[in-house]
Image (cartoon, rainbow, N blue to C red):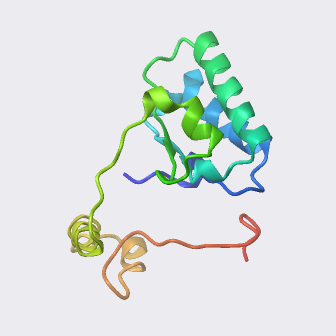
Amino acid sequence: PFPTYDEVLVCTPNTEEEEVELIVWRAVSSDSQNQKIYCLLGAEKLVYKVAKHLESHFFHLLQSSRVHDYRFIIFCNAKAHNSYVITAFDTYKVTIPCYSKTEIQAYLNTHLKVPYGTAPVAQAFEEPYQQNVKFVFSDQAGMGR
């Protein structure tokens, strides 16, 4: 399953230390045994102070935690060479191969179809391409706008 809203933090230069701290805590805490996958998207956009806090908080929690099978993914733009996050987590780096737009669309169309005969709630997402994943972007997340 795709990550839910509490598992993903979309980073911007305005992302605060507390937001980063919360998602790291969720990923590495003993409660993380619930098989969720926690993600930082666009982590290269974090300002230095927040990126430094991410690094120190992550490694501090990792040392004090008994959880060793956590699921935490940091997504960064490979072209952002001046990012502190990329430098700090370089030993964990995995390069994802580039796929064409057509290959990505074909994969999503194959794997994200609403199954035939599903509950009415899932059927609400059928328009226009029978996809069961939608992205909603907001300037004020959590405010219903």
- The quarter of the displayed image where residue 28 is located: top right
Q: Position of residue 119 (x, y in %)?
A: 34, 70
Whether 90 is drawn above or below 1: the answer is above
How many discs mark residues in the rendered view? 0
Direction from residue 37 to residue 23 in the image, left or right: right
Q: Residue at x 38, y 72 (%)?
A: 122
Observer-nearest of 84 and 63: 84
Direction from residue 135 to residue 63 in the image, left or right: right
Whether 103 is drawn above or below 71: the answer is below
Q: Residue at x 74, y 52 (%)?
A: 15
Q: Residue at x 66, y 29 (%)?
A: 55
Observer-nearest of 135 and 94: 94
Q: Quadrant of the C terminus?
A: bottom right
Observer-nearest of 66 and 107: 107
Q: Position of residue 79 (x, y in %)?
A: 49, 54
Observer-nearest of 17 and 117: 17
Direction from residue 14 to residue 66 in the image, left or right: left
- The quarter of the displayed image where residue 94 is located: top left
| Residue extending furthest toward the bottom | 128
Whether 99 is drawn above or below 17: the answer is below
- The quarter of the displayed image where residue 107 is located: bottom left
Q: Position of residue 104 (x, y in %)?
A: 28, 68
Whether 128 is drawn above or below 76: the answer is below
Q: Position of residue 106 (x, y in %)?
A: 21, 72
